[in-house]
Amino acid sequence: MTVTLDDIRKAEARIAGHVRQTPLLQDAVLSARLGQAVVLKQEYRQTTGAFKLRGATNALLSLPPDARARGVITASTGNHGRALAHAARAEGIRAVICLSRLVPGNKVQAIQALGAEVRIIGQSQDDAMAEVARAVQAEGLTEIAPFDDAAVIAGQGTLALELLAQRPDLATLLVPLSGGGLAAGVAVAAKALRPDIRVIGISMQQGAAMAASLAAGHPVEVAELPSLADSLGGGIGLHNRLTFALCRRLLDSVILLSEPEIAAAMRHIHATTGDWVEGAAAVGVAALLAGHLPAPDGPVAALLTGANVSPETTARVLAGELV
């Protein structure tokens, strides 16, 4: 099983009218510093405040009627759960969202406000995923995985189709890297359209499961630790079916960031756009600001993937506190 450009084009048609086309903004400061155009894909302006709506919507709309009737369940670090809750409410489908205690309260409340049932389970996404497996067997719910699912990956890949339609000359894409649903989908679409394009996965130094798995050559478990990039936390699953293989084959490199580098990027993005994004969304800009990216040979896009950040976190980052 894999995901193809044709799958992503079908997803694009399926979710049309359910998701927004998000804007692209040139970053004048970074463009001047790098000597190449640097553009920011403002995907945080998506309906639910994050890119996850693409994959969740495509997966939900792909389900047969009997699976919809049973209701859907997922584990999430927040944004996928909110996206699935939104998509399920629009279709009149029951949704159960399993979260660990590390998920910020503002994300929990946003999911509950959409009418989904929230279950707080354990101290990691792996714990929440164990509850999903139990509920699928015991309650008959239909699982929509947060990343390791062909329909979810295809939905996330529509972001690359949209981005390259807006800016066909891009040479490098900087993609937040967690379970790999976004990175895999973007890489499949981008490299099918532009084989020479570079796709670089960006994550945090603390608890980056996909990065550790790629380094090991197989899926591994890592301790899930608090981070400004909390949306990038969680394991990829020791029996990962899709995203590990796609990321290993298609990502050109992986960059890991410190917490101060992520915080600096959040402040830079706020100064540039007037908006606060999550630490997970700021990692591409962080890599550029910290000088981690090899000299680009053409325009660069950083995907700003979510803005569901708590007011407490933004206040501390703005004040320069070490979070």
Image: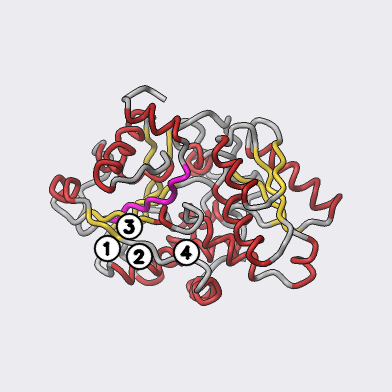
Q: Residues within 10 Å of mark 1 (few under 14, many from 20)?
A: many
SS for dot 2: helix
SS for dot 4: helix
Q: Position of residue 191 (x, y in %)?
A: 39, 66
Give the quarter of the figure containing the N terminus.
bottom right
- Find out whether the residues at labels 2 and 1 contact each other: C-beta distance under 8 Å: yes
Q: Earlier in the sequence, mark 1 or mark 3?
A: 1
Name the residue tied to disc 2: 163
Q: Position of residue 271 (x, y in %)?
A: 25, 41
Name the residue tied to disc 1: 170
Q: Earlier in the sequence, mark 2 or mark 1?
A: 2
- Find out whether the residues at labels 2 and 3 contact each other: C-beta distance under 8 Å: no
Amino acid of disc 2: Leu
Going by the image, does 235 lie left or right of 262?
Answer: right
Residue occupying the far top of the picture: 321
Distance of mark 4 from mark 2, alpha carbons?
Answer: 10 Å
Amino acid of disc 4: Gly
Name the residue tied to disc 4: 157
- Find out whether the residues at labels 4 and 3 contact each other: C-beta distance under 8 Å: no
Label drawn at residue 198: 3
Distance of mark 4 from mark 3, alpha carbons?
Answer: 15 Å
Q: Earlier in the sequence, mark 1 or mark 4?
A: 4
Mark 1 or mark 3, whichever is nearer to me: 1
- Find out whether the residues at labels 1 and 4 contact each other: C-beta distance under 8 Å: no
The span shown in magenta is 301-308
Q: Who's the residue at 45% across and 64% down the image?
A: 188
